[in-house]
Amino acid sequence: MRFGLSIGLMSLAGAAALAFAAVASPAEDFKAAYAKAEAASQQAASLKTQWTTTVATLHAAQDAAKASKYDDAVSLAHQAEALAQASIAQAREQASAWKDGVIR
Amino acid sequence: MLRKVLIIGAIVLGGAQVACADDAVDPKAEFKAFRDYFVGRFPKVPFDDFVNGPYSMDEGLRKQWKDIEEFPPYEFAVDKGKEMFAKPFANGKTYADCFPNQGIGIRQNFPYFDAKSGQVITLELALNQCREANGEKPLDYVKDDMAALTAYMAFTSRGKRFDIKIPDDPRALAAYRKGEEYFYTRRGQLNFSCASCHVQSAGNHIRTEVLAPALGIMAAMPIYRSEWGAMGTTSRRFTTCNSQVRAVPLPPQDELYRDVEYFLTYMGNGLPVSGPGARP
């Protein structure tokens, strides 16, 4: 009986912990997504291939997070990361492709 | 076996030759190809008219240009620039003391490669270097005073033909090459290069505007743009172009922008200075 009670209490504690984690996760999710986006954006900037839309989307993600709209913020951070990665891919492709356009 | 080795060797060497030819910098050959391309593409445009950009493209636009020249919107900038140019710095010297021929009629020689610093010196940069050498604060590169000063200096050089030199110095060739690379490199979310508009689409409409050919595009700088409602320098033109294709612009007078100006102005060698200009 006592053993059953302990199990019950532990289950309750576990459920409470999970619930707490679920409440805390949107902000954490945003932080993680934003960090990845910012790293990609910084790489793009160092390659001088930054897009204005990447910068604007990063700002929008921050604004959404400040307004506690974490779903939007995470989505915008993912968008910003995708934009930054696309600009990096563009720079890598253009490193040699620019020569194709030269008037000869 | 030996035959196979020789064939593979020939392929490798052949490939290397192509790569070398591709990477070789030959400004004279590229200058000729560049000019021939535009002259061939727009056979009805008199050569010197390329300096008028979009207004050179057809008779109607040429008429618009003549009308604009009746009351040119850049006139105030020329007057202001003249005044600024003559006004002594706090130490009593003037801009004229920093330039050959007292700064009059020299626009056609800018930008140039400076062997001492190993970099391209544009007129805008030279003006700020002059100010700083005389204890004055540098001007904003984008508009207002800098646009007025360069407008005046261009005005005193009107009709003189561009004569940009690329000395036999690997650093000068590298600067030319970097400028060329920047000009042809696609950037921004719209994936446009400078050449996308001013080579491939020159003479076409983009919304209501006609895109200027790259040949002679530097000759009218600085310009009054109706879109800006004000004068703007070459720096302003470059940064705006980058923003318009959704690329984060470089800082004004960044080394790469100066290299682009070097490349593009060299391509316009032989054309007359027409600045300051006016554009839609």
Image (cartoon, helix red, strand yellow):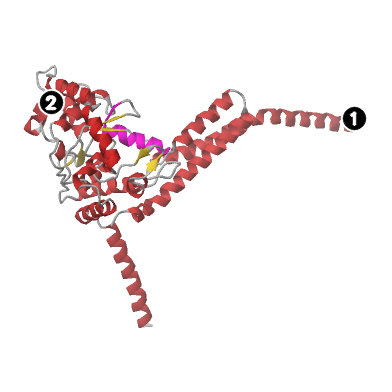
Provide the residue designation for mark 1: A2
User: What's the CA distance linking mark 2 and mark 1?
Assistant: 95 Å
* Res B256 visible: no
Provide the residue designation for mark 2: B95
The percent position of residue B108, horizontal first and vertical second, equals 15, 39
Q: Chain of mark 1?
A: A
* Res A75 visible: yes
Amino acid type at circle 1 is Arg
Residue B240: in magenta span: yes
The percent position of residue B187, horizontal first and vertical second, equals 40, 43
Task: Give the number of marks.
Answer: 2
Compared across the picture, whether B254 is left or right of A81 comes to left
User: What is the quadrant of residue A96 in the picture?
Assistant: bottom left
**Which of B44/B195 is in front?**
B44
Give the SS element for disc 2.
Answer: helix
Q: Quadrant of the C terminus of chain B?
A: top left
The percent position of residue B46, horizontal first and vertical second, equals 21, 47
